[in-house]
Image (spheres, helix red, strand yellow):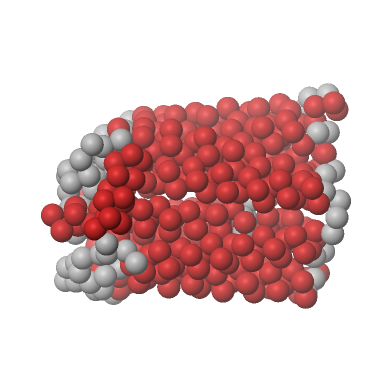
Amino acid sequence: MAETGISQSKLFEKLTGDEDSRLCQDISDDACREQPGNFVRQLLASLGNKLADEMASARLVLPWLLGAIGAPVWMVGLLVPIREAGSLLPQVFVAGFIRGMPQRKWVWAIGGVLQAACAVLLALTVLLAGGVLGGSLVLGLLVVLSLSRGLSSIATKDVMGKTIAKRRRGTLQGWSGSVAGAVTLLAGAILILFDDQPSIQALAILLGIAALGWLGNALCVALIREERGATQGGENAWKSVKRGLGLLRKDRAFLQFNVARALLLSSALALPYIALLGQQRSGENLGGLGILIIISGVASMLASPLWGKRADVSSRRVMRDAGLIAALCCLAAAAIAWAPSDWSTSIWPFALVYGLLVIAHAGVRLGRKTYVVDLADNDNRALYVALSNTLTGVLLLLAGGMIGLLAQWLGSDILLLALALLALAAAVTAHRLPDVE
């Protein structure tokens, strides 16, 4: 056991660049002693979660799945709003419940198990159902999966705040994204080899891998050594909403952060439309999906350590810079769609821009996660995270519907120009945020 502790400390110090793993800023002495082991466990848990997210991506894999089973096209437009908003909306209603639990890791683990079950059922749906019925089952399972993701999301940040010290959290998230990105390369390479082969079985295998990733996530989370925390202050959903709105009015930085986060939704909403443009213009099927998965994996592998280190220095600057890159990506994708046919009929130009936007989106996610955790303290962190996520979920559903209508009326290329303006506004808003590190 002692040798294991020493090896975990050495790995922790190597990954974070610290010479002394016992230096902690805002966690207890006991939590500080357990920090190296908990860092490794959360790194592995995050790896399983991120790998599963890639294998069951609503931006790439699920649209291909709906096409493969012959589901109506309009269902594709519901995937990203359901995936994102479904995981965000309920969080403020469970914040008070989680507050009453001395150890929040079990909520995180239960969320992982439920997501694994949904992935298994999605794989069975691919193999056994099709058309409107199959598409409806996919959307219904995606709702359950997203709600389960919401449980894990709020508990993840609360556990991280209790077990990992400031100026280490962004690094943890950065390394987990890098390792997960590397693992997804193999799946993309296999899909390219399949190319025009039947995609049903390959998609079912990807979803099976996602299930294993979420089960691994739940196991690693269960092994985290989390101190029993304070349970006072637990309250029902409406009291949580009322208190959260009060904090929103009092804390100007929190309000401004939520405005920036809402505008940064443009990066998430743009990703499927760039992929859709590539699919429409290139006419490639499973091979094109493989290329996009590989590009996404490479982008995640390159982006996460860069953003992670920078987020520990200034997470608001990470959000600002990511917003600027997202705006440029949206403009570039629209320009490629208008380019001569030699450019616009290949998947590769769209894939490269997609990869750059994945890098930007990684910065958006990592920057805002680190910012809200550092902005809050142990007494209100769960409520800050839950309220912010719920507000974002509401806006995402509204924006997703409007974006879908605009895409249908104006086309994906014109829509990307509008999203570029939103991303630019997000960068300006994030630039005005105060530093919290």
Instruction: Give the quadrant of the N terminus.
Output: bottom left
Instruction: Give the quadrant of the C terminus.
Output: top left
Query: Does residue 326 appear anywhere in the picture?
Result: yes
* Nearer to the camera, 89 or 294: 294
* Nearer to the camera, 409 or 391: 391
Task: Specify the quadrant of the image occupied by residue 72.
Answer: bottom right
* Nearer to the camera, 299 or 76: 299
Q: Relative to residue 172, is residue 201 drawn left or right? A: right
Task: Specify the quadrant of the image occupied by residue 225.
Answer: bottom left
Which residue is located at x 43 percent, y 37 percent? 305
- Which residue reaches farthest top? 340
Tell me where residue 63 appears, x and y as whole percent: 71, 55
Which residue is located at x 52 percent, y 35 percent? 302
* Nearer to the camera, 218 or 56: 218
Q: Relative to residue 349, is residue 247 drawn left or right? A: left
In this rendering, the answer to whether 330 lies above or below 227 is: above
Which residue is located at x 50 percent, y 46 percent? 179
Tell me where residue 81 appears, x and y as whole percent: 58, 56
Tell me where residue 182 appears, x and y as whole percent: 56, 44
Q: Relative to residue 167, is residue 148 drawn left or right? A: right
Tell me where residue 368 appears, x and y as whole percent: 38, 44
- Which residue reaches farthest front? 3
Which residue is located at x 58 percent, y 49 percent? 183
Q: Relative to residue 211, is residue 310 drawn left or right? A: left
Query: Does residue 257 appear anywhere in the picture?
Result: no
Task: Specify the quadrant of the image occupied by residue 95.
Answer: bottom left
Count of all numbered marks drawn on residues in the image: 0
